[in-house]
Image (cartoon, rainbow, N blue to C red):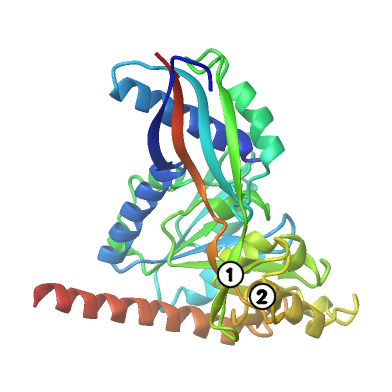
Amino acid sequence: MHELSIAMSIVELAEKESERRGGLHITAVHLRLGLLAGVVKDALLSSFEMAREHTPLAGSRLVVEEIPGVVYCTACDARRPVRSSEWFCCSECGSIASEIVQGKELEVVSLEVQE
Amino acid sequence: MSPGTRIIEVRQNVLKQNDLLARALRRRFHDAGCFVISMVSSPGSGKTTLLEKTLTLLRPEYRGAALVGDLTTENDAVRLARSQAPVKQITTGTLCHLEAAMVQTAIEGWNVNDLDFLFIENVGNLVCPSSYDLGEDLRLVLMSVTEGEDKPLKYPTIFNSADVAVITKMDLAAAVEFDATAATHSIESVRPRMPILNVSAKSGAGMGAYLDFLRSRRAASLQALTHAGTARLI
């Protein structure tokens, strides 16, 4: 259950960004979350509710964009989506492929602010 | 989006602070010639026992030290102190994983130039430690024969992030009808071509090959650094 630590880091990151820009009224934080990032979306959303309390982000929302996993398949010499986070296999030929090219994202993309 | 609202682009990795710190630690360890190995596994798969044996067996030849993470108690540090290597316990309170900042704090007062190997035993957990870079050169994932052979399939993220898998408690393999082929297949599914080593810290079986692996990885890392250093000079 490291989602709370992650949520606290998100709040901290947003607060720093706000300070850097001379104070913002942040209404939402937009996050890109990869399927293979090892973070559970629902746990992160409820953790965010706790982490934002008593901070300038108290009334803000966390908006999560889920990013599918993509591996590089050496047999096909192509990028292929993974079927699930349990099997790092090519969705076309079924070969085992562990070179993850997408899906580890854990990134704050933008902040929604009220003028 | 309501009127009066605007979007500010940020594009920042949430774990950026940890990653930056881990990178700085890695550089510091490299400069000191200290090879860092982190150990991850579920609770009870034998990290501390393997580490105690490892430190003892490396001792005549190399200077090793260990950091051990646990929620509470100093029990592991006390056990490891028997190896006579410098050991520090990191108690995380309720935190389920180690972070780079904890490693940095823990090594304060240690001269890393005096170390050839530093082992970082993470909190027993197969989920949370996967996201946190600790500045290690090698991430070692342990799996004991008493756990299910499908463990890697249940926790693919951490197995995928590891560099080597060590199957422990091999002395119990027959008693628990451990299926080595199934275990290998599970590991291969989530991390193809990852080296797999079988050991029993209790009987000593497989320990020679395991220690050779650590030695060769350390040597390769130092050699790569020497080359990089030469390249920088040119």
Question: Which residue is farthest front?
Answer: B3
Q: Amino acid at mark 2?
A: Cys
Whether B82 is drawn above or below B217: the answer is above
Whether B211 is drawn above or below B153: the answer is below
Q: Which residue is under mark 1?
A: A71
Residue B201 visible in the snapshot: no
Q: Residue at x 34, y 15 (%)?
A: A23
Q: Position of residue A54 (x, y in %)?
A: 53, 12
Q: Label 2 near label 1: C-beta < 8 Å?
A: yes
Relative horizontal placement of residue A31, taking residue B189 as reference (left or right): left
Chain ID at mark 1:
A
The residue lying toward the viewer, choosing from B130 and A99, is A99
Q: Hey, which quadrant is residue A6 in on the image?
A: top right
Q: Which residue is under mark 2?
A: A90
The residue lying toward the viewer, choosing from B45 and A100, is A100
Secondary structure, mark 2, is loop
Whether B217 is drawn above or below B113: the answer is below
- Identify the image quadrant of the C terminus of chain B: bottom left
Q: Amino acid at mark 1?
A: Val
